[in-house]
Image (spheres, helix red, strand yellow):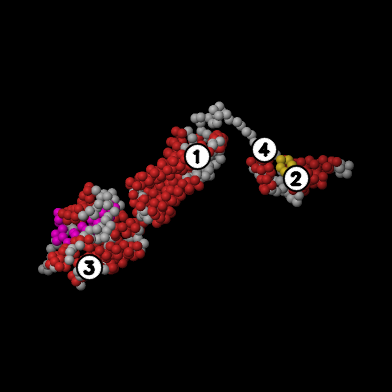
Amino acid sequence: VRRALAPLENDGLLKELKHRPAQGSQVSILVYPSNNKRLVHRASVDDVRLDKAKVALRQRLDDEFKEQGSMLDNASVVADLTYTWLDPRLPETLRLDETASEEEAKRVVAAVEPVTIDYKAGVAELAPGGKPLTEADRLLLLREHEAWVAQLNLADRAARSAATFGMYVALAVLCGYYIYHRRPKLLSDLRSYLTLLVAVLVTVALGWVFAADQWRAEMIPLMLFGMTAAIAYEKELALLLAAAAALILAFSLDQGLAEFVVLVASVAAAILLLRRIRSRTKLIYVGAFTGLVVLLTTLGVGILAGQAFGATSHTRLWGGEWIAGYENSFLVSLLTGGLWLGFCCLLAGVLMTGLLPFIERVFDVQTDISLLELGDVQHPLLQELVRRAPGTYNHSINVASIAETAADAIGANGLLVRVGAYFHDIGKMLKPSYFVENQGPEGNRHESLQPAMSTLVIIAHVKDGADLARQHRLPQSIIDFIEQHHGTTLVEYFYRREAQRLREDPDAGELDETTFRYPGPKPQTKEAGVLMLADVVESASRALVDPTPARIESLVHDLAMKRLLDGQFDECGLTLSELHTIEDSLVKSLTAVYHGRVKYPEHQTV
């Protein structure tokens, strides 16, 4: 029995191999005692696997007992009984040493002599034309390119570096020229300019990281940048900057025209589909529709170019072979690549929902989502305005209603105008009784003040409102409405009172018109221009004794012309056509407010 078991003690026993074919031989293995690696020897897999080793053991037992035939009456029966007793008691005595296996694999690989194949320039064909490239073709072309770069001399390298730098400079000049003529304020605002520059650099850097072979998802940071630029600036500028970033990415990653087209298609679709964001789900829809556009673009460009983007012989997410048995299928590789890119677009939309508050804070912009939250009447400032200056609050609500309609009529941001109108007069709550809409039984306090002093009190509500807004951390776009809704207009009532006083007392001095003007600035946006006109016509319409449609129309037109001739709309970009549209909208809104009513008969007791 000892002699029959000796081979098993020497080689060991194993139920099944613990390594895959790619990790080592399936025919023979190296075996050594656990306490002495020097006694290593090679054993056949058939000799150590339990299922086959048992067969050999049974034969050896039979042979051994037959040699003792002179001592045994029935050697075969004894051998069977012995094997039956040993069979369930045979243990697994071998254990896979993964560390030693890896070291042995490296040693074997290092011992293999490299095989060199020479390709003569202009003679040998590196890859067949007109057919999809295999992974071997791609690696061969990559090695050829590396060899070509390695043989370049210093002058050639300098020329290539200069050409690359020149392309980047040309892109920077093109974008800078556009910004200088279309968005000059962006260049004058150092913080905004640096924020934009950092955003571009971060996009390119993340594109490099996401472009790794196991991801191929450089589209995600590019789409996030494009949507951010569209939210913070305008679509035209966002398209230009995103296209420039896509070109830089494609060039720096050694991608071709096909990849560049797909990148531009993704970011352009996202920017054009973005529009107004009134809910976070809108961003997910944008990502989904952009993914569909990219899928179709990928299929079209891939078929025309005859190449699946990034397809390799191992699993990759851009053009990766996910379906076993279809590694050489061009259409399957192209389709899986397109589906992955579409998923990247959807993922970018989902990520944008989480990044949106951060983007609004960094770029100091407001989407419709934040404006809807800001326009809640439960805002502490609005509640304080209701309590301290209810007349001003009612005026602000009315102005918000008519101004939003007018802004929408010219294609401006009506929601922004409405929220700005809610807060435009919050400064009046500090001295509410000095404003006519809040005056009570105590009468007009300005009767005891000089016109110049009254003007200072009236004008101060602009600065007070801006200070209150900053204390409550309102966004700059709302503060702009507070500071610009009067522009540099004249406080006409007190100006005329002062002129009358000086006529009655010639020795009192000269009349200085600038003393009676608001400090400004004038409206800088169309939305601010709409609010200025809506504010003044709403206040003036309250003084109409008989607010008929004709009188309202005449009032609105006169006030609009007065502001126009005074130069208040010079800096906000309003055209005469848009001004006329605003007038029509305000007339309709005010006519609806002051519509005629049926006079009910008095109740008489019979």
Q: How far is the residue under mark 4 from the one under mark 3? A: 98 Å
Q: Which element is circle 1 on?
A: helix
The boundaries of the magenta stretch are 525-551
Residue 62's x, y, as percent? 81, 41
Q: Can residue 491 be seen in this view?
A: no
Mark with earlier residue (2, 1): 2
Q: Residue at x 49, y 30 (%)?
A: 130
Q: What residue did someone put label 4 on?
A: 112
Residue 222's x, y, as percent? 44, 46
Looking at the image, residue 122 sits to the left or right of residue 99; the answer is: left
Main secondary structure of the magenta stretch = helix
Q: Which element is circle 4 on?
A: loop
Q: What residue did someone put label 2 on?
A: 40
Mark with earlier residue (3, 1): 1
Q: What residue did someone put label 1 on?
A: 158
Depth check: 504 or 494 in front?
Answer: 504
Q: How far is the residue under mark 1 from the one under mark 4? A: 39 Å
Q: Which of marks 2 and 3 is in front?
A: 3
Q: Residue at x 73, y 45 (%)?
A: 31
Q: Rate crowding at label 2 as few (under 14), some (14 to 19) or many (20 or more) other CA atoms within 10 Å.
A: few
Q: What residue did someone put label 3 on?
A: 453
Q: Which element is circle 2 on?
A: loop
Mark with earlier residue (1, 4): 4
- Name the kind of residue labelled 2 in the image: Val
Residue furthest to the right: 70
Mark with earlier residue (2, 3): 2
Depth check: 107 or 148 in front?
Answer: 148
- Name the kind of residue labelled 3 in the image: Met
- Name the kind of residue labelled 4 in the image: Val
Q: How far is the residue under mark 2 from the one under mark 1? A: 57 Å
Q: How far is the residue under mark 4 from the one under mark 2? A: 22 Å
